[in-house]
Amino acid sequence: MTVQLRGLTWDHPRGYRPLEAFEAPGVQVVWDRQPLTGFESTPLSELAERYDLLVVDHPGLGAAIEAGAILPVEDVFAARDLKVWRERAVVPTWESYRIDGYGWALPLDAATQTFLYRPDRLSKPPGDWAEVLSMSGVVLCVAGPHAGLMLLGLAGDRTGAGLLDRSRAIEALEVLRAVWRRSDQSAASLDPIGIHELLADSNELMCCPLVYSYAYYGGVSEDRVPLAWSAAPRLRADDRLANSTLGGTGLAVTPRAYARVLAVTKYVRGLLDIGVQLDLVSAVGGQSATAAVWASDVVDKAWNGHYSATLGTLTTAYIRPRFDGWIAFQDELSVRVREVLQSSVDAAAAVDRIEDDYRRASHG
């Protein structure tokens, strides 16, 4: 007897091909797709009534938990399974899904902001933003939440005292504004997928200094030039941690799945198997959160060196706040950053205003 589950993922080959390609004996998952923006526009409580499995991102966990839309992984899976999956996950994906001592999703896809470029036009990627300022053919990813996520990558406060490291944030806004004024601003409406596609097709553009990476665009294709990546540029020459904000997705289980929990467990065990992640998920363009994939020379070569070039940036990336209300604040943060880029407003005043608004948002 085959048990049928319903799942919802995002509408890009990286998001749906691995899930649609995998089959577990006795379990059939019917996967629906929606744009990434759909996860923010449709109430999670509504999605949880229709699906057993949801592909989510960690910044939205607070809202999902508040809505009762997802279950702690400890309520669904055995402790021995969780221990194995935790040990196999690439750092810091596992921790990004943990809040208040519980895990709320299993790392499925790993990504962070990196330097994206055309290897046929650029032989040596820059090490810091000072070098970026001297380059031509640059485009910035500022659409949706991404303007704010650049600022967080460069100046997010890793101590937990606030949102931003003030001195770094002021410096970062001034650098980003200088780069913006020299960049191709016609791409201002493009998300990371659009930026990758633009660079692959453009005859003039050379790079995007900080954008979420898609290994999928490093594969050989008749339709586009394979792209390449390198570590996120440092804001300051002596920076040791990556100047990048963590992305990726996780697999969450909804209360609806309690009635089919054994099927869920069987399916997830199979999906997160190292062999499946190496040989199936990566082969069809997935970007696994399994550390063995990031360490694989075979996988790395298949996707034009994406994994070896960006692993260091991924493992030290900044993890965003995840409280209920963060997504709305994140959107407002990007509005503020775009205002700075497009004007001569004082960067210090903008940082102070952002920090004040963050304190109000995070304290309810």
Image (cartoon, rainbow, N blue to C red):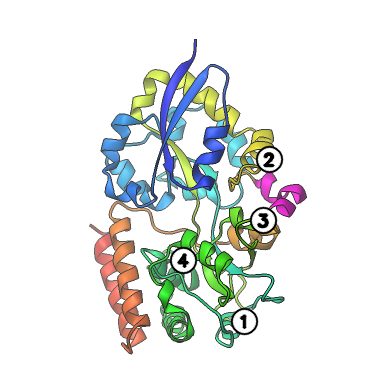
Looking at the rendered structure, which numbered label has been put on residue 361? Answer: none
Q: Quadrant of residue 111?
A: bottom right
Read off the residue under disc 1. Answer: 237
Sequence-wise first label, 2 or 1? 1
Farthest front residue in view = 222
> Residue 321 location, x and y as percent?
39, 58
Q: Could you tell whether 221 is left or right of 100 in the image?
A: right
Q: Which residues are magenta?
A: 291-302
Read off the residue under disc 4. Answer: 159
Residue for point 62% across, 42% down: 284
Front residue of 27/119: it is 119
> Residue 232 location, x and y as percent?
59, 69
- Disc 4 is placed on an element classified as loop
**C-alpha gap between disc 3 and disc 4:** 28 Å
Front residue of 111/94: it is 111
> Residue 265 location, x and y as percent?
51, 24
Q: What kind of secondary structure does the magenta stretch mostly adopt? A: helix
